Every structure is written in structure tokens, then in C-alpha cells.
Image (tube, rainbow, N blue to C red):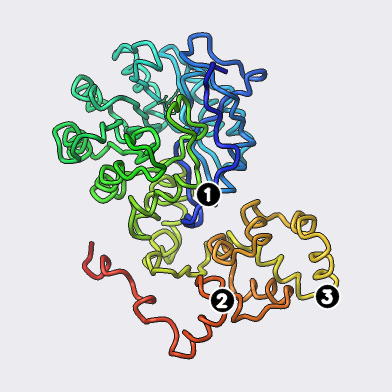
Amino acid sequence: MDFGWRVYHPNPSKPTFVAPPGAVDAHCHVFGPGDRFPYAPERKYTPCDGPKEKLWALRDHLGFSRNVIVQATCHGADNRALVDALQDANGLARGVATVRQDVSDDELQALHQAGVRGVRFNFVKRLVDKLPYDALAEISAKIAPLGWHIVIYFEASELPEHYDFFTSLPSTVVVDHMGRPDVSKPVDGEEFTLFLRLLHEHENFWCKVSCPERLTRQQSYRYDDVVPFARKVVESFPDRVLWGTDWPHPNMASHTPDEGLLVDFIPRIAVTTALQHKLLVENPMRLYWPEEADARIDRKDGMSQRKPYADIPGTTIFDQDMGRIGYQLNQFCMSLMKAQNRERFKEDERAYLDQWPMSEAQKQAVIDRDYNRMIALGGNIYFLAKIFSTDGLSFQYAAATMTGLSQDEYAQMMQQGGRHPGGNLYPASREEGK
Ligand code: 0GY
């Protein structure tokens, strides 16, 4: 790897924000490992290895479910590391490849088979040699029959130069990192207004509201100066936004991002649960797993996809999707009805949990006794109750841990009539039809 290269965070924090079930990290990469998948001779940087296993572990740690892996320039148009990761992902990852203009239909078919659903055109001069528009136009014509989209990466200052070419592209176009705005300029200034115009006037354009860590001009992990830009995009185009970690963060010079804090940035730019669900679940599913999104819409009741109840503050409805996601977790809970299973669990929790085909995130939530996270991952409180009774704890104690109150405070709140009814209502934004 290059001298001074910043290796990704060895121990990212656990986010406070609990992502909705099925959340997608829609912008991340795999690097190498270089001894199996050599970096491209024409690359502009040599990164540290960022293998797929580490990416899956990060996904689970952050409470996410799926990834979209974007081919990074250090691998050029050699997509083998990407394909290897996609084939290892059990359908939980899709890819965006880089191809040359002479790519054959068979090669494109093989990439599609592996899970690739788009190509990336990179215009950032420090990353690639200039690509002629006619070569890119030829690629976009070749991928059109596959229904793929095009991901574009450019600097804000270069948007005017590329504007006509971008708007001539026939497919869905996804812009990386909000077109890299200079966030020291005003959000309603000329530069960002042009970017918003691109999205406003061209409904085939989508935007990744990612990389506050790259865009910030401040020396703080809060990335406050990026919030107005990302929030503006999310609220103006809620059905065409995606979010991603950008792990393993190529070419970050200023600091090593903590992905837990990046996840905590999400509720500051998507401020209602409805917006968060679109950003993290509905939109990426529609673009990368349309067959699953359509299958849901096709159900007789049609409810599974629309979920009008998904924005009730502080409440997770245990519906058929949650039942499916949490099935093994809840089965594990039920196994604790038997005394001998309780003994085995107490003896070695990890070994007992490893006998269940649960996700790593679910197992970790059990080990942490993090009931809110268990619920977010499909756990049902009536089954989860078996865990806290195995621990010899009361229902009241467990409920208190979910609210952040002590057991005494919780008891007092219940005796005084329980939670304020406002906590059970839909947010005002729904009432106003926003
Ligand atoms: C990103 C950003 C960068 C790099 C690449 O493909 C790449 O090499 O995308 C960057 O250096 O800004 O999105 O990963």
C-alpha cells in the first residue's frame, strides 16, 4: 500500500441510530486482497487490502443487511475481486462494475449473473485518465438492454463542463457523494443550485447522500457543515436517494472515519422514519433488487411494500417481513423454554447461539442484551421475554432498559399512567400529507 495510506478503522463504534430492517449500504468497495486479485497496472493509488470478509463483518456490526459494492479505480476494469465478493454474498450484495468500451455481451452477461447491476464512469482527474465521451456512450448503449444504470463520480466545479453529456445518458444515473459540493459555499449558491437543477429537471438522476467525511471542511466527526446539503437533497428527492459508508474509504487523508459515527449521521439528514426507510431500504431495493421489491408489491394485500405504519415513532410493528427476518432469533428464544437448553445457553452463550442460523448482528444483540436492537432485527417481545426470564429478570426490568430509564423511573412512569399518548401517534408530517 502507498506510504501514508490510512487503513480503515480497526474498531468502529456501535451506532446509536438503529437502521431499519433490511438496510442497504449502497456505496462501499472491496480491495483485493492484492495477492489474489492484483491491483490494476494503471491505478493511481495502491490501497491496503479491504477483503469481503471484513465488509460482511462491518455490515453486521452496523446493523445493516445488504451491500452495493462499487468497483474502485485501483482495480481498473478487472472486476474479479468484485465478482468474487458478490458470489460469496448469498444474494445480499449487488455490484457496480467498470468496463471498457470493447466489453463483450458474454462478459456483461457473466457480470449480470454475478449480481452486477450498473457501471461506473469516473471523471475525477486524480483517480483516472480522461475517458472520451464517445467510449462512454458506447458502453451506455451496451448495458441498456440489461436494464443497468450508470454511476457517475465528479467534482462539483466540473459539472458545467459535463452537464450536457450527463443529461444525454439514456438510463438511470446515480451521482456519487452529491457531486462533491464545496460545502464552504452556500447551499443555495450557484454551484449546488446547478446540481439540484440536474436532479430536479431529470427524473432519471439519483443521488448518494454519502461521504460527509470527505466533504467536510471542519475538524470534527460531526460533519455539521455537510448536513444542510444532504438534508436538502433527501427532502427534495426522497425517492431517488441512496446512502453508503464508502468503506474502506480510499484516499482519506484527513482522518480515519468511524463508520458507527457515519451511521449516526443518517437521522440528521433523513429526519423522519419514513425518509430513513426510503433512503436505506425502499430506494436501494428498487434499484438493485427490483425483483424482490416487485414481488412485495405483487402480494395480494400490497401492504408489505408500502408499510404506512413504518413511521410510528419509537415503534416497530411485528409484521410478516419482521416475522421472516426474526424467525430464527425467535425460535432460539423459544428453545429457552426447556431447562436443559437454558443450562447450555448459560454455560456458553456464543456456542449455543452458533447452533442457530441467525445473523451475526442478531447473535451480538443477544449477547449484548440489547433488546431494542433485537426488536429492530425481527425479535418479538413475547419471544424475547424468554431471554430475560432466563437471566432471572422481570419484564419490567427489561422494558426499562429499552426506554433508557432505570427500573424505578420506569415503574413510576407506568404508575403515573404510562407513556404520553403523543409517543404513539404518527408524526405531524403524515397528518399534513408531506
Ligand atoms: C470513493 C471515493 C474515491 C475513490 C474511488 O474508485 C475509487 O478509487 O471512488 C476518492 O478517492 O474520492 O467513492 O470511494
Could you say which is closer to the camera, residue 30 or residue 325? Answer: 30
Name the residue type under label 3.
Answer: Ala
Q: Residues within 10 Å of mark 3 (few under 14, many from 20)?
A: few
Q: Are marks 1 and 2 in contact (CB under 8 Å)?
A: no
Instruction: Report which residue position mark 2 lands on.
Output: 399
Instruction: Report which residue position mark 3 lands on.
Output: 339
Instruction: Report which residue position mark 1 lands on.
Output: 64
Name the residue type under label 1.
Answer: Phe
Q: Is residue 165 above or below residue 66?
A: above
Q: CA separation, marks 2 and 3?
A: 24 Å
- Quadrant housing the C terminus: bottom left
> Residue 265's x, y, as percent?
40, 48
Quadrant of the image occupied by residue 136:
top left
At horizontal 45% and vertical 24% (from top left) the residue drawn is 251
How many labels, in total? 3
Q: Which mark is residue 200?
A: none
Could you say which is closer to the camera, residue 78 or residue 4? Answer: 4
Q: CA separation, marks 3 and 1?
A: 33 Å
- Quadrant housing the N terminus: top right
> Residue 74's x, y, as percent?
50, 18
